[in-house]
């Protein structure tokens, strides 16, 4: 991210000399919503989530619908990491079986299978995150990282930020991961964004998008950063009230078009100043809207009794 955009994101975590954090935060949110197309995209995402929230199926069958959302979210998150164990449709069936305990991992899983397991575990772990947990962001990130990375790396690296001598090789197209001092400063900023979302101090869609992007840009862990970022966005959107039923499949919104727009928007966020920041926020809002539409499809299928072992058609 260029210095201008980086300072704008960091500014969310800073308090001025008079303690006027709320007013300063409002100014920064106003700036972000004033970027081209951002406010309109956010409004459309909120409308899509409202439509999902009041779906008739979710009066009594939220648990069933949310479980399917997590399955589809895990499959989409794995695909964004390049892991489809048997093509899109079959991968969805495999992920579903893994998440309901109907199949065991191979004795010697290959990297694709390990990544799929990682996505399944961390997306399942979002079910256990509660709103009050967001008051301790570092602990939530640590728990999600343990779930995401345990199939990928040794236990010595789990649940903690990388050390100065440790290297992250994910998202190499963004350039080298930030060094230790910058990483720690930006992790503090991420924590403040989570706290702001938890306290309802601004638009949750904006906070979720920035948390997601910063976790990938900073790459605080040796591995599993993208998986944790998407799981954290899911958790924030659910717990801060955008998608309170947890049925939207935001990961699938990000993975549309084989994830090309997702990776392009992430690169723009890191490199593109105001335009890149705006592009990322619009992408995330559109991903939420697409995820909510897929949530409606899930709820329709639940209401009609069509959510069988094969689930819905793959997207």
Image (tube, rainbow, N blue to C red):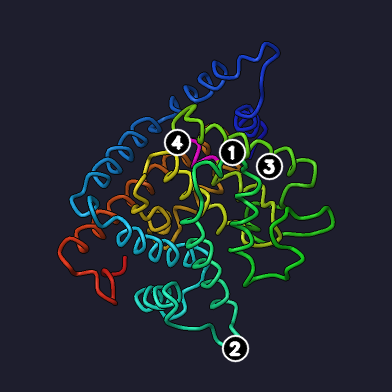
Mark 3 to mark 1 CA distance (whole Å): 15 Å
Residue at image position (45%, 83%) is 103
Residue 132, position in %: x, y? 53, 41
Question: Can you say whether 89 is above or below 221 in the image?
Answer: below
Which region of the structure is painted magenta? 205-210
Residue extending farthest right: 165
* Disc number placed over residue 107 in the picture, else none: 2
Q: Quadrant of the C terminus?
A: bottom left
- Circles 3 and 2, Cβ within 8 Å, touching? The answer is no
Q: Nearer the viewer, mark 3 or mark 1?
A: 1
**Secondary structure character of the magenta stretch overall:** helix
* Disc number placed over residue 135 in the picture, else none: 1
Looking at the image, residue 226 sits to the left or right of residue 84; the answer is right
* Disc number placed over residue 187 in the picture, else none: 3
Looking at the image, residue 44 sits to the left or right of residue 113; the answer is left
Q: Earlier in the sequence, mark 1 or mark 2?
A: 2
Residue 133, position in %: x, y? 56, 44
Question: Can you say whether 47 is above or below 107 in the image?
Answer: above
Residue under numbered circle 4: 204
| Label 4 element class | helix
Residue extending farthest bottom: 107
- Circles 1 and 4, Cβ within 8 Å, touching? The answer is no
Q: Where, by quadrant of the figure, is residue 312 drawn?
A: bottom left
Q: Earlier in the sequence, mark 3 or mark 2?
A: 2
Mark 3 to mark 2 CA distance (whole Å): 36 Å
Looking at the image, residue 243 sits to the left or right of residue 197; the answer is left
Q: Where, by quadrant of the figure, is residue 95 drawn?
A: bottom left
Residue 222, position in %: x, y? 71, 60
* Residue 286 among magenta residues: no
């Amino acid at each position: 991210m260029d210095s201008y955009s980086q300072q704008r994101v960091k500014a969310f975590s800073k308090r001025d000399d008079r303690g006027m954090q709320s007013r300063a935060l409002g100014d920064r949110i106003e700036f972000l919503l004033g970027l081209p197309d951002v406010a309109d995209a956010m409004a459309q995402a909120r409308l899509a989530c409202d439509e999902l929230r009041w779906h008739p199926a979710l009066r009594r069958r939220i648990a069933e619908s949310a479980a399917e959302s997590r399955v589809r979210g895990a499959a989409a998150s794995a695909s964004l990491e390049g892991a489809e164990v048997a093509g899109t449709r079959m991968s969805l069936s495999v992920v579903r079986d893994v998440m309901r305990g109907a199949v065991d991992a191979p004795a010697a899983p290959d990297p694709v299978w390990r990544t799929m397991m990682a996505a399944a575990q961390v997306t399942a772990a979002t079910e256990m995150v509660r709103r009050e947990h967001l008051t301790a962001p570092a602990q939530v990130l640590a728990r999600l990282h343990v779930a995401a990375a345990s199939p990928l790396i040794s236990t010595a690296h789990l649940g903690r930020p990388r050390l100065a001598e440790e290297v992250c090789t994910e998202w190499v197209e963004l350039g080298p991961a930030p060094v230790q001092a910058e990483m720690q400063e930006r992790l503090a900023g991420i924590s403040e964004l989570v706290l702001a979302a938890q306290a309802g101090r601004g638009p949750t869609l904006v906070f979720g998008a920035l948390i997601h992007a910063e976790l990938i840009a900073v790459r605080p862990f040796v591995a599993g950063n993208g998986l944790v970022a998407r799981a954290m966005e899911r958790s924030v959107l659910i717990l801060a009230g955008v998608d309170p039923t947890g049925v939207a499949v935001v990961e699938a919104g990000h993975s549309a078009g084989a994830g090309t727009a997702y990776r392009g928007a992430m690169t723009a966020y890191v490199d593109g100043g105001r335009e890149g920041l705006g592009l990322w926020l619009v992408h995330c809002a559109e991903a939420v809207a697409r995820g909510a539409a897929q949530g409606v499809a899930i709820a329709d299928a639940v209401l009609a009794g069509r959510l069988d072992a094969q689930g819905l058609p793959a997207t």
